[in-house]
Image (cartoon, rainbow, N blue to C red):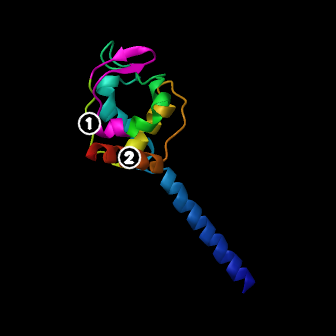
Amino acid sequence: MLIKTKILLYVAGIAALFTLTRCFYSDKQNEGEQLYTQYCANCHMDDGSGLRNLIPPLAGADYLENHRDDLACIIQHGQTGNIVVNGKNYNQGMPAFEHLKPGQITNILNYVQTNLGNNNPRFTIQEVEKQLRKCRHLLED
């Protein structure tokens, strides 16, 4: 009886490991890069360098660290007005992508945070959801 229990636990452990592994190696593994290419690269460029004096860079951008708590809201609701990135002023508006889900926004942010010359901490979906709740509340006021 003890041997059967050990075998069952071993098989269950392997099944759980297989399931977890599939979660991390799904078709969405590169979703952040794909979404960046689809929604961001037209303005911020494939390499994140921005567009001359109009669109700020994301590559090596101090804004990503200095405004971390605002980034999810900026993606979902857009941005207008002057911003300063790496000491340079930009005043070109950014469109909203309100149809993107929190998981998609998380993946875009994590792609930008860990690519394009950036080495910033990754976002959790909980952190993004919290930011989105906060900015949604501010928009309603």
Determine the CA span between mark 2 and mark 1. Answer: 16 Å
- Hey, which quadrant is residue 107 in on the image? top left
Amino acid type, mark 2: Lys
Q: Report the side of 65 relative to 33 (left or right).
A: right
Q: Is residue 116 above or below residue 22?
A: above
Quadrant containing the C terminus in the rendered view: top left
> What residue sits 29% from the left and 19% below the top?
91
Q: Is residue 43 magenta?
A: no
Near mark 2 (Cα within 10 A), the count class, few <14, some 14-19 or many ≥20, is some
Q: Secondary structure at mark 1?
A: loop
> What residue sits 36% from the left and 34% below the top?
36
Q: Is residue 85 magenta?
A: yes
Near mark 1 (Cα within 10 A), the count class, few <14, some 14-19 or many ≥20, is some
> What residue sits 33% from the left and 30% below the top?
40
Residue marked by disc 1: 96
Closer-to-camera residue (25/127): 127
Q: Are marks 2 and 1 in contact (CB under 8 Å)?
A: no
Q: Is residue 128 above or below residue 15?
A: above
Residue 134's tag is 2
Which segment did they paint magenta? 73-92
Marks 2 and 1, the one that precedes in the sequence = 1
The number of numbered badges drawn on the structure is: 2
